[in-house]
Image (tube, rainbow, N blue to C red):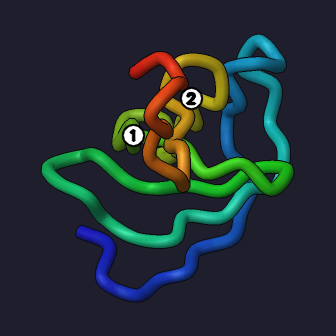
């Protein structure tokens, strides 16, 4: 559906209880799975076609940039 990235617009933010804030969709990861950036944090997002908005999960869908080290836990 979306082919041109980045997309910057108001999106529902999970940590703000769904409040609309400016965020950026950086690319597509899979079927209705997008990588978004909000406040410098990369995370997963989904698109809801019924309300025509993205939902950014900056609570549980955070994407970590680095791999865990030898002495760090996997999570």
> In what quadrant of the picture does the N terminus appear?
bottom left
Counting residues from the start of the chain, the first of labels 1 and 2 encountered is: 1
Question: Can you tell which quarter of the image residue 4 is in?
Answer: bottom left
- Looking at the picture, does residue 48 appear above or below residue 32? above
Q: Position of residue 62 (x, y in %)?
A: 55, 34
Element type at mark 2: strand
What residue sits 54% from the left and 54% below the top? 65
Q: In the displayed image of the protein, which residue is found farthest to the top?
A: 17
Q: Nearer the viewer, residue 15 or 51?
A: 15
> In what quadrant of the picture does the C terminus appear?
top left
Q: Is residue 34 shown left or right of residue 42?
A: left
Residue to which mark 2 is pinned: 57
- Looking at the picture, does residue 4 appear above or below residue 72? below
Q: Is residue 31 shown left or right of residue 25?
A: left
Separation of marks 1 and 2 at Cα, in angstroms:
8 Å
What residue sits 58% from the left and 37% below the top? 56
């Amino acid at each position: 559906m979306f082919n041109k990235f980045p997309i910057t617009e108001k999106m529902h933010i999970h940590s703000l209880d769904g409040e609309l804030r400016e965020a950026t969709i950086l690319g597509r990861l899979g079927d209705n799975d997008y990588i978004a950036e909000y406040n410098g944090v990369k995370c997963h997002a989904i698109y809801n076609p019924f309300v025509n908005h993205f939902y950014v999960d900056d609570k549980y869908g955070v994407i970590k940039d680095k791999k865990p080290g030898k002495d760090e836990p996997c999570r």
